[in-house]
Amino acid sequence: MTLFDEVGADRLRAMVTDFYAAVFVDPMIGFLFVGKDRARLIEREWELAARMLGGGVAYAGRTIREAHKHVPILGGHFDRRLELWRQAMVAHGFPEAAVEALMAHNRALRAQVTADPTSDCNHEQVQRVTAIAAPATLVKLGKR
Ligand code: HEM
């Protein structure tokens, strides 16, 4: 019996659906999802999480690095998403082992999602990350 069996396909889908409902309206990270295809995100995240839990499911998405390379994600954004993910798992009564496994898998992907290694308020680092990820945003803000 895998952790995927313990959680169940339907409960995982309900959790990911609620997670994205929270993400899209979140005051800290919701703006990064404006205009994104929520149904597609739910499908891809479901596949990825199912795999992380040992389910024999194929992931049909881009690599994590590729999917996020144009999104200006800072360390705090990464941690906020992870906290919303944890809250959704707890709300759906995930077994402790599944919570731990998904948190660990997500944390391990950090470097592929953001070049910001911490969530500290480090202005030089913030400038470097946003300059790499979103030069167009800086132009709009009149910073270049
Ligand atoms: C370990 C952490 C993360 C995982 C596992 C993850 C997973 C995913 C997956 C599976 C996709 C869809 C890929 C595809 O369409 O082919 C995606 C897209 C996306 N993610 Fe993440 N993500 C993570 C962290 C984050 C964070 C921290 C943010 C922002 C706060 C974020 C924002 C986005 C956005 C905006 C997209 C859509 C990109 C686009 O289609 O232009 N992700 N993510």
Image (spheres, rainbow, N blue to C red):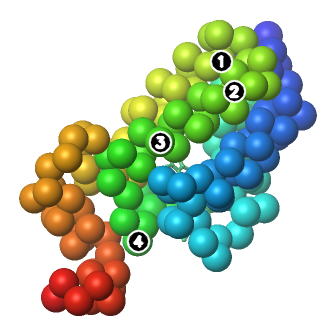
- Dot placed on the residue nearer the N-terminal end, 2 or 4: 4
The residue at label 2 has a CB less than 8 Å from ligand 1: no
Q: Which residue is mark 3?
A: 80
- What is the three-letter code of the residue carrying label 1? Ala
Residue 115, image x, y percentages: 26, 53
Q: Which residue is mark 4?
A: 70
Q: Residue at x 32, y 46 (%)?
A: 75
Q: Quadrant for residue 91, please give it.
A: top right
How far apart marks 4 and 3 lie (CA) works out to: 19 Å
Q: Residue at x 47, y 42 (%)?
A: 80
85 in relation to 64, above or below: above
Q: Which residue is mark 2?
A: 89
- What is the three-letter code of the residue carrying label 3? Arg
- Dot placed on the residue nearer the N-terminal end, 2 or 3: 3
Residue 6, image x, y percentages: 80, 15
Q: Quadrant for residue 107, please give it.
A: top left
How far apart marks 2 and 1 lie (CA) works out to: 9 Å
The residue at label 4 has a CB less than 8 Å from ligand 1: yes
The residue at label 3 has a CB less than 8 Å from ligand 1: yes
Q: Quadrant of the N terminus?
A: top right
- What is the three-letter code of the residue carrying label 4? His
Q: Which residue is mark 1?
A: 98
Question: Could you classify mark 3 by the number of other residues whose Cα lies within 10 Å: few (under 14), some (14-19), or many (20 or more)?
Answer: some
Please indicate, yes or no, whether residue 63 appears anywhere in the rendered image.
no
Q: Residue at x 25, y 50 (%)?
A: 116
- Dot placed on the residue nearer the N-terminal end, 2 or 1: 2
- What is the three-letter code of the residue carrying label 2? Met
58 in relation to 87, above or below: below
How far apart marks 1 and 3 lie (CA) works out to: 19 Å
The reply to whether callout 2 and callout 1 are in contact (CB within 8 Å) is yes
How far apart marks 2 and 4 lie (CA) works out to: 28 Å
